[in-house]
Image (cartoon, rainbow, N blue to C red):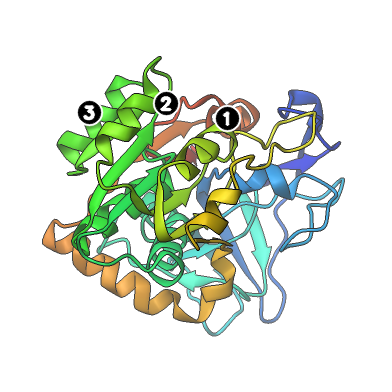
Amino acid sequence: MQNRQYLLASRPVGKPTAENWSLVSNEVPEPGEGELVVRIDYISLDPAMRGWMNDARSYIEPVGIGEVMRAGTVGIVQASRNPDYAVGDAVYGHLGVQEYALTDGKGLHKVDPSLAPLPRYLGVLGMPGMTAYFGLLNTGQPQAGETVVVSGAAGAVGTVVGQIAKIKGCRVVGIAGGPDKCRYLEQELGFDAAVDYRADDFAAQLKAACPKGIDVYFDNVGGDILDLVLTRINVRARIVICGAISQYNNTTPVKGPSNYLSLLVNRARMEGIVVFDNAKNYGKAAAEMAGWLAEGKLKAKEHIEKGFERFPEVLNMLFTGENFGKLVLEIEHD
């Protein structure tokens, strides 16, 4: 049985290209004592992957040249000599961009396909959902009646942030690209307003949508949108820095906030979040969000693309805004 893998061949400058990857094929190894083999069915594609490709100091070691590209995955145990996992178990873990993975089980979590489809464990019940939950509630600390704004609002993290803010009684404004995504946020997810950053009157739309200013801003985008939001924040506002997808493929230095003095004037706080810092509480968060899903208070949307060999092109959908919901690559096994 052959295992295809995508290895990082070179570090990208700007947007990743086909030349940055090496597609190799190897025989799937037999598990040794304490090991198991997982057939990977779905691969999570996340903006953070672009940062993992850089040889730079960060919250996690970069992927090495010649190593399997890091990624969140869900799949089914195919063979096991590990007492904690049986053949047929569905598991989540960071097993990388490959069709099969040999692992000692560390970092794996069993998931229940009868409670939710497997791709959902890469979205609202996976790393993006955990990012939204802890980033908003622990760092943003929204209070009922406050105005919460989220950028990248139609993405995997943004959709969950907005819905949790609504559950907590806030006025929620989403920033997204294009009328279809804005309609989805308002009509399907119940956001109070959605503004299109591609519109000529974006600044006026944002001001109109936030008549009482902005108390919490959950930022997935950075750049010009962060700068604009900083002109609308209230006293004691909280800005949660989750990501800056507008800057990830820059070949020039990252654009920092030129309006940062608004933080001083408004005695506001800007704080970065990394989801792994909350790992010990994932179970509690997943249980609460599963309850919200069951009650219909929380909705999930996955954007599933098929074909393992399409990984390089599908990954780049994140940076062009083509994905609508949590971007997942499905592997079609023979």
Q: What's under tag 2, amino acid-wise?
A: Tyr
* Residue beneath disc 3: 183
> Horizontal placement of 196 versus 41: left or right?
left
**Rendered location of residue 41, percent (x, y):** 49, 48
| SS label for mark 1 | helix
Q: Earlier in the sequence, mark 3 or mark 2?
A: 3
Q: Residue at x 46, y 63 (%)?
A: 135
Q: Residue at x 65, y 30 (%)?
A: 312
* Residue beneath disc 2: 197
**Rendered location of residue 38, percent (x, y):** 57, 60
Residue 128 or residue 33, whichever sits in front: 128
Q: Are marks 1 and 3 in contact (CB under 8 Å)?
A: no
> Horizontal placement of 236 versus 309: left or right?
left
> Horizontal placement of 181 versus 275: left or right?
left
| SS label for mark 2 | loop
**Rendered location of residue 94, percent (x, y):** 60, 60
Q: Residue at x 78, y 42 (%)?
A: 7
Q: Up-down: is 233 above or below 125?
A: above
Q: What's under tag 1, amino acid-wise?
A: Phe
Q: Residue furthest left?
A: 295
Q: Earlier in the sequence, mark 2 or mark 1?
A: 2
* Residue beneath disc 1: 319
Q: Residue at x 71, y 46 (%)?
A: 51
Q: Residue furthest bottom?
A: 83
For disc 2, the neighbor class at 10 Å (few under 14, some 14 to 19, many from 20) is many
**Rendered location of residue 39, percent (x, y):** 54, 54
Q: Earlier in the sequence, mark 1 or mark 3?
A: 3
Q: Up-down: is 244 above or below 81?
A: above
- Residue 4, visible in the rendered structure: no
For disc 1, the neighbor class at 10 Å (few under 14, some 14 to 19, many from 20) is some
